[in-house]
Image (cartoon, grey):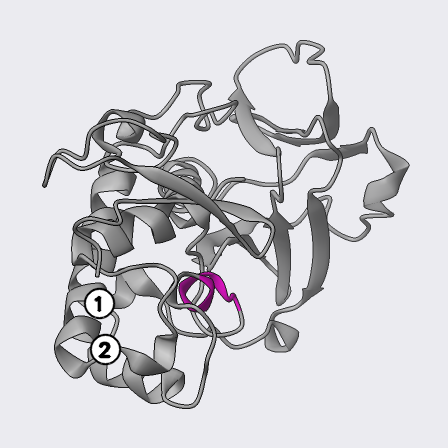
Amino acid sequence: MPELPEVETLCRQLKTILPGEEILRIEILDARLGKIEGLVGRRVEAVKRRGKFLQICISGGLTAELHLRMSGRLFWQKGGVPVFAYSRLVIAFPAGTLILIDPRRFATFTVQPLESTPALVEDPLGGLSAHRLREIARTRRLPVKSFLMDQRLIAGIGNIYACEILFAAGIDPRRPSSGLSPVEWRKVAKMSVAILERAVACRGTTVSDWRDLFGCGGTNQDHLAVYARKGEICRRCGGRIERITQGGRGTWFCPSCQQ
């Protein structure tokens, strides 16, 4: 699933293309997306990210909001529009065409008035406050990894980056979030920013089918310390990376150096 760094990558790439562009045509290729009306002839004013949501602000006070879910990705095509397998949505502009490709068909695309867009919860790229994290977690017995992935509390962190952040901070993902000390929360806050910023600089993590706006894979997979490394040697302490299941998701960590 595309997480914060992947969506931020798309956001930054689209910001160089879409603002000022007029929407010439919208073609729905999958009825599951529903009807999208009232956008043709309007212009894109800005492109933003809200957690894992990509927002396209459109003239007339409208916001088109896209969530890529499990397997969605966007592709920018200049010139003629080729037929891609699993294409679900095509939006044509004078400069080119934006195509939503989504094999599992879980991605959502909605249009709503700007003022009805939900308020943003804590966003890690904005700089997480260790004090605020501890305050939110104070009464929660939720494991700290599940806490970091709760989109109602913190926007954008998914499975890959939660594993990597907790490894970098040296914290066992099974610990209750209410039990972390102020010093440990400072480590989590610091490592969250560092891990996510590096992933954005690498245009995301390609461990499956992630591609950026121009069809290129990310390179952050070359920097992963624990994710998908079960049985391999920990690069920090020499122990063995283990995998457990939390909330139906795999968790990779080093039980020797994550306390």
Q: Which percent across, then down, holds residue 24? A: 69, 34
Residue beneath the point at 38% across and 67% down:
144
Q: Is residue 48 magenta?
A: no
Compare residues 16 and 59 and report the one nearer the observer: 16
Label 2, on which residue? Answer: 129
Residue beneath the point at 45% across and 74% down:
121
Label 1, on which residue? Answer: 189
Compare residues 142 and 40 and report the one nearer the observer: 142
Q: Are marks 1 and 2 in contact (CB under 8 Å)?
A: yes
Q: For the magenta stretch, what is the residue range?
A: 146-151
* Residue 259 lies in quadrant: bottom left
How would you classify the magenta stretch by its main secondary structure? helix
Q: What element carries label 2?
A: loop
Residue beneath the point at 62% across and 39% down:
70
Compare residues 92 and 130 and report the one nearer the observer: 130
Q: Which percent across, then down, holds residue 183? A: 12, 77
Mark 1 packing: few (<14 Cα in 10 Å), some, or many (20+)? many
Q: Image check: 213 left or right of 90?
A: left
Q: Which amino acid does label 2 sit on?
A: Ser
Q: Distance between the residues labelled 1 and 2?
A: 6 Å
Image position of 74 with respect to 163: above or below = above
